[in-house]
Image: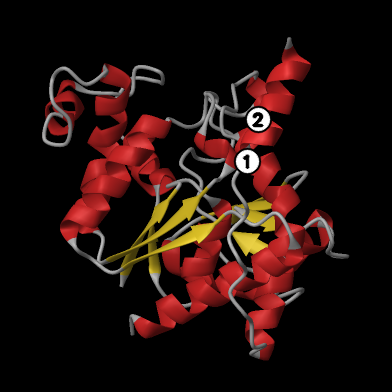
Amino acid sequence: MIVIAPTSQVTPDQITRLIHGLGLEITVKETCYGAMVEGSHEIVLKAVEEARKLDPDRIFTKVRGFPMGDARRCRAHHGSRPGFTQLEKEWECLSLVEKGVAAARRGEELRELPPKPMLSVKELKKVVEESK
Amino acid sequence: MKVMIVPPNSLILFDLVERYGHEPLSLMGAIGDRVTNPEIESPPLNVTPEDVKAGLKYAGIEVPSGIRGRLAIWGPLVDKAEAAIIMEEAPFEFGCVGCHRTDEMVRYYIRKRKIPFIVVRYPTTEDEAKVMVAKIKEFLEGLK
């Protein structure tokens, strides 16, 4: 699965066309979040590597459990997508993660951030009072 | 090296592990093996009697079946792992796609195995994301 960060200028169509143009023996499907690629492991890795070159910091990948178009999951067959809410949540976070990937590539020196303060008793009392 | 990711279906962690040259051990991979096996019926009937027995290795009979079922899949991944990355405070640990008790058990097994692991926080700001990626990169490069 190829997922494009929301800040990227690359479109799912561009990725799909690029992979099609490589002429590899794989199946490619354009999706709302990027593309899905299916085939032998080595060829898929090669395709993903090429797709990543379009925008290295903003193109993310992961493996998908169910095959492409599987009737149990595919929306076209009214399949359920229990993992979609998580994918959506992580997709939102990619705009932050890509900044981290770029900073790591540049070798930026970073300081450990202090842990978030715990909820104070005063704040907790306020929440309880408000919920009454 | 084989690196276990927690939450085991995280896109962010899967990508970072692969990006920095290691093999992520993920839930999607384990589920993929199961759902493409013609001997297993379609989900939600994708837990076999063998899985139930496997789950007993990681959780006692008194543990809720949902946790045991999940551990039947996640447990072998922990056994295979040579290192682990744990992301804390991920909002998707809860609700229908997650099970916090299973997460706790997995973290316990990772610690018990004494493999190298790192704990990072789910980022909510740009600075937190930069620190998280830098920590993960340093950890993964140190594994080589």
The image quadrant of residue B64 is top left
Q: Residue at x 35, y 64 (%)?
A: B3
Label whose residue precedes the other's in the sequence (2 or 1): 1
- Image vertical order of residue B62 relative to residue A44, above or below: above
Q: How is the image coloured?
A: secondary structure
Q: Residue at x 13, y 26 (%)?
A: B60
Residue topped by disc 1: A119
Other residues around mark 2 within 10 Å, as few (<14) / some (14–19) / many (≥20) = few
Is residue B118 among the parts visible in the rendering? yes
Local SS, label 2: helix
Which numbered circle lies on residue A124?
A: 2
Q: Are marks 2 and 1 on the same chain?
A: yes
Q: Are marks 2 and 1 in contact (CB under 8 Å)?
A: yes
Furthest residue in direction right, as rendered: A9
Disc 2 from disc 1: Cα separation: 7 Å
Tell me: A18 left or right of B87: right
Chain of the residue displaying label 2 = A
Q: Type of residue at label 2?
A: Leu
